Amino acid sequence: MSQTIDIPELSRTPITFCAGPQAFFAVEYDPATGEVVMLDQRRLPTEVVYYRYTKPDQVADGIRDMVVRGAPAIGISAAYALVMVARAEEGEAASFLVANGAASRVLNATRPTAVNLAWAIARMSRKAADVAKLDPRARYEAMLAEADAIHREDVESCRAMGKLGAEDVPDGATILTHCNAGALATGGYGTALGVIRAAKEAGKTIRVLADETRPYLQGARLTSWELHVDGIDVEVISDNMAGHFFQKGEIDFVVVGSDRIAANGDVANKIGTYSVAVLAKEHGVPFTVAAPWSTVDMAMPDGSGIPIEERPRDEVAKVGDKVLVADGIGCRHPAFDVTPARYVKAIYTERGAIHPSDGQTPADLDP
Ligand code: MRU
C-alpha cells in the first residue's frame, strides 16, 4: 500500500502494534507527558491523524464522538483516562476517590451498549479503592500498571480467541465480517479480525468480504483499510449485497465481534449483524462471534435487556457533508442489534469456545 502510516513518538514502546508490515495503534498512554494518544478513526482511511489528550474529559469526548470505537478499545481508553486522574490528583485518599468516581461517571455515560467500558471502569475503580491510601506517586503507578494490564490482557485474549476460531475456518474460505472488530477496535490484533489474522498465520488461504456497515461505515473505512495494510485479501460490499453473495454460495464462514454477550448467549453487535446471522442460517453458513470475556455480561440474563445506543439523526441523514435526507424528516439510528443465541454457531473467547445454537451458554466457561 502506498499510504505511509506515521506513528507518533511515545516515551515508551507501545504495548502493541497491528500485526503486519505497517504499524499503527488505536490508543496508547505516554507516561512522560501523561497524555492519552489516540488515532482519529473518523478520518480513516484518507488521513492518519493522532491526537494527544491531556484531560480525562477529552478522552470521554473522544469515546462519545467515535475518535476511538470498538468495545475493548473504549474500555482501554477509559482505563487510561482514570490513570490521568490519578496523575493529576495529589490530595488525600478521599479526594482521589472522589475525583476517580466523578471521572468514572462521565466516562461510563459515553456509550451504553459495550459492556467492556463499564467493566474496565469498574476494574480501575476497584484498584483505586485498593491503592487510595498510598502516596500519590505510588497510587498513580499502580493505576497505570492496572490500565496496562487491561490493555495487554486484551491483546493476549485476541490472540487466544483468534487461534481457536481459526481452527474452524476452512482452507480457501471466503469470510464475511460486519463492522470493524480489528486492531482498531481492541488493544491490538482484533477479535473477529484476530480470527482472520490467525487463519492466515496458520497458512490458510482466505479472502474477506467486508460489509460496508451503514451508517458509520466501519467496514468500508476501517476493516478494509486495516486488512489491506496487513496484506489480507479483502473486498468491500454494501450491506444490501450480503444476501446475494450467500445465495451464490460465495460465503463460507461469518465472524463478527460483540459489544455485549448475555448469559444465555444472545449477542449484541453493530446494527445489521442480526440480518447477517439470519441470512447465514438460511444458507447453512456458520455464523460465529469472537469476543474477550470482558464482553460477557453474566448479570444480563438475555439480550432483551441490553441497552441499545441511539445515535444522532445526522449520522443516517448524511454521509460526510452530503445530505441524503431532507431537513425535517426523522431518521432512526439504533447503533446495535441483538442476535439471538440460536443463530450463533460459536463464540470464541480466551477461555474457550461456546456453541449457543447447540444449547451451550457462557456459564459453561464460567468457573
Ligand atoms: O459503534 P462501534 O464502531 O463502536 O461498534 C463496534 C462494534 O460493533 C464492534 O463489532 C464491537 O465493538 C466488537 S470490537 C472488537
Image (spheres, helix red, strand yellow):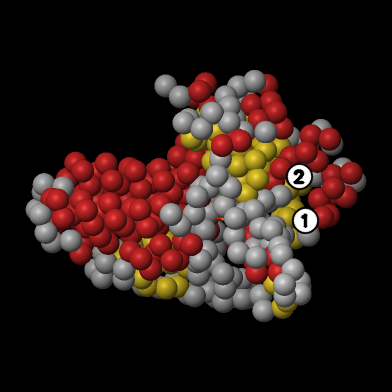
Relative to residue 70, is residue 265 depicted above or below? above
Relative to residue 226, is residue 322 depicted above or below? below
Determine whether, in the image, residue 9 is placed left or right of residue 200: left
Determine whether, in the image, residue 334 is placed left or right of residue 64: right
**Percent from the top left, x then y, of residue 363?**
50, 23
Specify the farthest residue to the bottom. 321
Q: Nearer the viewer, residue 124 or 49?
A: 124
- Please state which amino acid type lies under the numbered disc 2: Ser
Q: Nearer the viewer, residue 15 or 345?
A: 345
Identity of the residue drawn at 40% across and 62% down: 60
- Please state which amino acid type lies under the numbered disc 1: Asp
Q: Secondary structure at mark 1?
A: helix
Instruction: Tell me, yes or no, if residue 191 can be seen here.
Output: no
Is disc 1 surrounded by few (<14), some (14 to 19) or many (20+) residues within 10 Å?
Answer: some
Specify the farthest residue to the front. 328
Separation (CA) of disc 1 from disc 2: 10 Å
Q: Quadrant of the N terminus?
A: bottom right
Quadrant of the rendered image containing residue 165: top right
Q: Which residue is mark 1?
A: 239
Determine whether, in the image, residue 236 is placed left or right of residue 78: right
First along the sequence among labels 1 and 2: 1
Q: Which residue is mark 2?
A: 275
The reply to whether callout 1 and callout 2 are in contact (CB within 8 Å) is yes
**Percent from the top left, x then y, of residue 329?**
74, 68
**Residue 35 tag number:** none
**Percent from the top left, x then y, of residue 188?**
48, 53
Identity of the residue drawn at 69% across and 58% down: 332
Determine whether, in the image, residue 46 is placed left or right of residue 119: right
